[in-house]
Image (cartoon, rainbow, N blue to C red):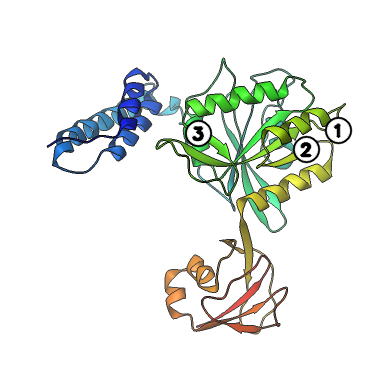
């Protein structure tokens, strides 16, 4: 029985054979296995690929422990998500990613005036009103440097923040190198509403663009060029010296994430407006109850809602659509 493998499979298989980085090779092997049609004609092929995946995992474990547990080197291709969303900052050398993470979070990346000072990812939490977002500082991307683990980090993040140095006349050129490098890794940068990539193996990542080091000299021409290059993306001018621009970035992340906050209250008590339930825009009473616990939803009879454009304590049913900042009182 023929295997009937898609053309993309053979393309990826060639890359898999040529790849030398073990972690990237493992990712490709798992992608190849997922691509295979599941029928008798691919039984042997599936078994062979599963064996290769098993061997690659063992190779990674051996590398991690070859110098003993005390010398264990952590993998950088995964960072557990925290807060309301994960934002990965990427860009060319010396564009100011680390300075942004430094001023917006309690993380302390190495901030230096020379390129390539960041050698591994670092996460910190950025506060926006009553919620937090996780920011990830990363090594620079250039024609000379691309850390293999970056592919998985970028694929896993909720938002990509593409950082351009507005004080560098060649800043947009350096940014295009980053974009092309990601395209080679089958990652495309797009807006929240962009359709999935036509190429089977490409992934479109929700992206915003930061024109950083603004208000330092004549930055407007480069900012205008960014707007021409990325007409469908959210573009913000930022500076660590300008609090309003940092506030705009916090708000921009919230908007691009396309989420809303819903606060809960006990019957007969005042709302505390802390620790909100995070829902996608357009979420309903049922979605909020499910976010708390599936059994909570099963027992829910009705809810009362307070918020803009609503009667105070308005009684609503499961399918009632909520808006950002609503207060909800569940009745079970």
Q: Secondary structure at mark 1?
A: loop
Q: Nearer the viewer, residue 120 or 208?
A: 208
Q: Nearer the viewer, residue 110 or 292?
A: 292
Q: As displayed, is residue 323 above or below residue 252? A: below
Depicted 285 relative to depicted 193: above or below:
below
Circle nearer the N terminus (2, 3):
3
Measured as percent of width and height from the top left, residue 187 is found at 50, 33
Q: Residue 160 placed where, x, y %? A: 60, 39
Residue for badge 1: 215
Quadrant assignment for the N terminus: top left
Name the residue: 56% across, 49% down: 82
- Taking the spot 34% from the left edge, 29% from the top edge, the residue there is 61
Expressed as whole percent of the image width and height from the top left, the position of residue 153 reads 51, 36
Q: Report helix, strand or loop for mark 3.
A: strand
Q: Are marks 1 and 3 in contact (CB under 8 Å)?
A: no
Which is in the foreground here, disc 1 or disc 3?
3
User: Quick check: 153 left or right of 116?
Assistant: left
Provide the residue designation for mark 3.
Answer: 187
Quarter of the view holding residue 53: top left
* Mark 2 and mark 1 residues within 8 Å of each other at the beta carbon: yes
Q: Which residue is labeled 2 in the image?
A: 237
Residue 313 visible somewhere in the drawing:
yes
């Amino acid at each position: 029985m023929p295997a009937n493998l898609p053309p993309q499979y053979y393309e990826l298989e060639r890359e898999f054979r040529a790849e030398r980085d073990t972690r990237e090779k493992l990712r490709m092997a798992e992608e190849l296995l997922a691509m295979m049609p599941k029928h008798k004609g691919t039984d042997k092929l599936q078994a062979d690929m599963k064996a290769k995946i098993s061997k690659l995992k063992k190779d990674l474990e051996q590398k991690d422990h070859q110098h003993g547990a005390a010398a264990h080197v952590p993998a950088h291709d995964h960072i557990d998500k925290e807060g309301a969303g994960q934002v990965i900052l990427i860009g060319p050398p010396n564009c100011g990613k680390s300075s942004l993470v430094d001023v917006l979070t309690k993380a302390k990346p190495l901030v230096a005036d020379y390129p390539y000072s960041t050698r591994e990812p670092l996460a910190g939490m950025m506060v926006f009103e009553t919620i937090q977002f996780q920011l990830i500082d990363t090594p620079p991307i250039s024609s000379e440097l691309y850390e293999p683990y970056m592919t998985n980090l970028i694929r896993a993040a909720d938002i990509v923040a593409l950082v351009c140095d507005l004080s560098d006349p060649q800043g947009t050129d350096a940014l295009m190198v980053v974009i092309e490098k990601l395209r080679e890794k089958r990652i495309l940068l797009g807006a929240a509403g962009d359709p999935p990539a036509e190429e089977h193996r490409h992934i479109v990542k929700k992206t915003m663009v930061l024109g950083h080091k603004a208000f330092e000299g004549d930055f407007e021409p480069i900012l205008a060029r960014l707007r021409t290059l990325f007409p469908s993306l959210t573009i913000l001018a930022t500076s660590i010296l300008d609090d309003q621009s940092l506030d705009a970035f916090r708000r921009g992340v919230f908007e691009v994430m396309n989420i809303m906050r819903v606060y809960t209250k006990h019957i007969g008590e005042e709302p505390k407006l802390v620790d909100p339930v995070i829902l996608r825009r357009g979420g309903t009473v049922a979605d909020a109850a499910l976010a708390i616990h599936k059994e909570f939803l099963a027992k829910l009879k009705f809810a009362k809602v307070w918020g803009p454009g609503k009667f105070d304590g308005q009684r609503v049913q499961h399918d009632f659509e909520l808006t950002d900042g609503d207060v909800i009182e569940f009745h079970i």
